[in-house]
Image: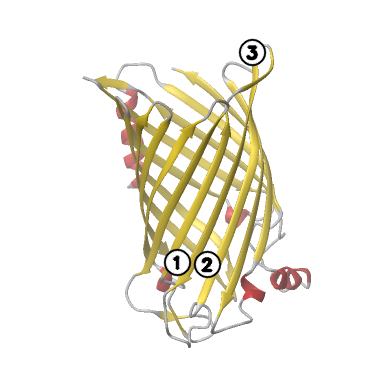
């Protein structure tokens, strides 16, 4: 049904009669820890304990196509959008998956409002014991950008996500709500954006049993801080430009259960750091290249289970190259 909705919107876009703007692209990435394994897990993998994983690292190829068309109603510009994407894992094929995103972008004077729906099926995280941990997700997102001064924008953000796990992990089914606000300023040579997000995850229904036979509840609240530095175009040759950027995100997640028998979540606090830096290369009129390094570190602490960090802390690094081609129909 979700795919039919995306195709219906695509046909609506194609039937408007104006020029259709398209973008297609691909990314080629190396991830040194595709399952977010802790040091203990990596040792177990080296000992052959994780027969469900072919490798702990992997090469990932992503491909996507985005189609949009802008039309005007009075002073309002409307842009319906459809995007399809697929990620292919070279060694660990179970993690390969696709997604569909549809939405409408609206621009009116100093205000921009974007509404999106996304469907993300068959996301495979890892295997516990003999059962796979997978989920499907629906995503609804609304964001707004208002220009308050010549060089300043206020931004608002809202996202609602529905998670549906497979039959072995239905206790983790739940709804996530993320709200945020921020500010963006245009300096002479770069843009700087700061955002704050508050996220809650509430599991549906009653708690179930985890693999150890204890009750488990994954409800949590999280504070998320994001800082983005985006350089404006720098000319490196005649009509050849680069656009460097640095993004930093910090998340503090606190699990809400007070049931001490749930030693996976009770008294648990996660701190997650993510830094990415790279550059866009604008070397041709319709073709853009990208290069990026992304580093993720999660540190877990627990007042109930002091040893939890041994199995939950992880480091991951990713190097990626991308290409994007724009054209019109």
Question: Looking at the rendering, which quadrant does residue 107 occupy?
Answer: top left
Identify which residue is drawn at 48% across, 44% down: 194
Tell me where residue 223 appears, x and y as whole percent.
45, 60
C-alpha gap between disc 2 and disc 1: 7 Å
Tell me where residue 69 appears, x and y as whole percent.
36, 24
First along the sequence among labels 2 and 1: 2
Q: How many marks?
A: 3
Tell me where residue 158 appears, x and y as whole percent.
35, 49
Furthest-left residue in this view: 74
Q: Which residue is mark 3?
A: 239
Q: Are marks 3 and 2 in contact (CB under 8 Å)?
A: no
Q: Which residue is mark 1?
A: 166
Identify which residue is drawn at 52% across, 59% down: 251
C-alpha gap between disc 3 and disc 1: 51 Å
Q: Which residue is mark 2?
A: 133
Residue at disc 2, secondary structure: strand
Q: Residues within 10 Å of mark 1 (few under 14, many from 20)?
A: some
């Amino acid at each position: 049904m979700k795919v039919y909705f995306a195709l219906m919107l695509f046909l609506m876009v194609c039937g408007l009669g104006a020029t259709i703007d398209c973008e297609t692209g691909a990314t080629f990435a190396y991830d040194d820890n595709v399952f977010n394994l802790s040091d203990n897990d990596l040792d177990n993998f080296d000992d052959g304990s994780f027969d469900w994983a072919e490798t702990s690292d992997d090469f990932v190829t992503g491909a996507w196509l985005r189609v949009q068309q802008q039309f005007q109603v009075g002073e309002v510009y409307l842009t319906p959008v459809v995007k399809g994407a697929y990620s292919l894992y070279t060694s660990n094929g179970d993690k390969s998956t696709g997604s569909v995103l549809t939405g409408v972008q609206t621009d009116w004077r100093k205000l921009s409002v974007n509404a999106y729906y996304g469907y993300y099926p068959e996301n495979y995280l890892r295997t516990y014991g003999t059962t796979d941990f997978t989920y499907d997700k629906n995503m609804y997102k609304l964001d707004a950008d208002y220009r308050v001064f010549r060089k300043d924008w206020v931004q608002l953000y809202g996202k609602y996500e529905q998670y549906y796990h497979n039959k072995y992990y239905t206790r983790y089914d739940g709804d996530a709500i993320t709200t945020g606000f921020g500010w963006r300023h245009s300096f002479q040579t770069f843009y700087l954006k700061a955002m704050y997000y508050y996220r809650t995850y509430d599991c549906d229904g009653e708690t179930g049993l985890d693999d150890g036979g204890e009750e488990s509840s994954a409800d949590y609240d999280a504070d998320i801080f994001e800082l983005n530095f985006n350089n404006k175009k720098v000319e490196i040759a005649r009509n050849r430009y680069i656009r460097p950027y640095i993004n930093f995100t910090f998340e503090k997640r606190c699990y809400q259960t007070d049931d001490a028998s749930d030693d996976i979540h009770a008294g648990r606090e996660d701190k997650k750091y993510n830094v990415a830096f790279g550059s866009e290369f604008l070397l041709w009129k319709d073709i853009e290249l990208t290069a990026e390094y992304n580093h993720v570190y999660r540190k877990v602490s627990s007042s109930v289970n002091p040893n939890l960090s041994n199995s939950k802390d992880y480091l991951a690094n990713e190097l990626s190259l991308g290409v994007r081609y724009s054209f019109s129909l």
